[in-house]
Image (tube, grey):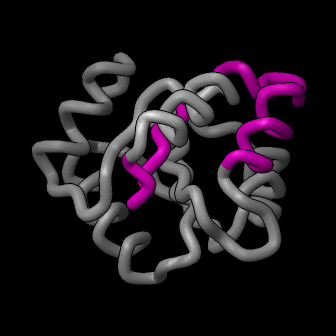
Amino acid sequence: MKTCLIVDDSRVIRKVSRHILETLGFQVEEAENGQEGLDRCTEAMPDVVLLDWNMPVMTGIEFITQLRVREGGDKPKVVFCTTENDVAHIREAISAGADEYVMKPFDHETLQIKLQLVGMA
């Protein structure tokens, strides 16, 4: 079973994302900020990370930058899930190591398509 770590400070977003991912057959873990997300990755590296941009403690960009330099941190597919939609933000996310980008709010079909694009659905 594929695993997904949802890193988002919004409990509602984590709950909605968990529901979608579980219907797609993923085992899901959650973290409410980037530091907690990195701690979860140390415990067990997920196959996919759904990553929020703006969070307390550590931003999504800080998280992915630190994830990608860790042993095994190049393996997870990272999908930024955020309200930031300008080209500069998208470019920054991809440059930092993101594999895909999805706008909030998103639905089941949109998330499934993004996961297919990164080879995980």
The location of residue 10, given as percent across then percent down, is 49, 79
Q: Range of the magenta residues? A: 61-85
* Furthest residue toward bottom: 11
The location of residue 113, given as percent across then percent down, is 19, 31
Magenta-colored stretch includes residue 48? no
36 vs 88, left or right, is right
37 vs 102, left or right, is right
Residue ID at (22%, 57%)? 106
Residue ID at (88%, 26%)? 69
In the figure, 102 relative to 38: above or below?
Answer: above
The location of residue 16, given as percent across then percent down, is 29, 70
106 vs 4, left or right, is left
In the figure, 25 relative to 11: above or below?
Answer: above
Residue ID at (15%, 52%)? 108
In the rendered image, the quadrant that contains the N terminus is top left
The location of residue 22, given as percent across then percent down, is 29, 55
* Furthest residue toward left: 109
* Residue 77 in view: no
Magenta-colored stretch includes residue 84? yes
In the rendered image, the quadrant that contains the C terminus is top left
* Residue 75 in view: yes
In the figure, 3 relative to 71: above or below?
Answer: below
Residue ID at (46%, 38%)? 79
104 vs 80, left or right, is left
Q: How many marks?
A: 0
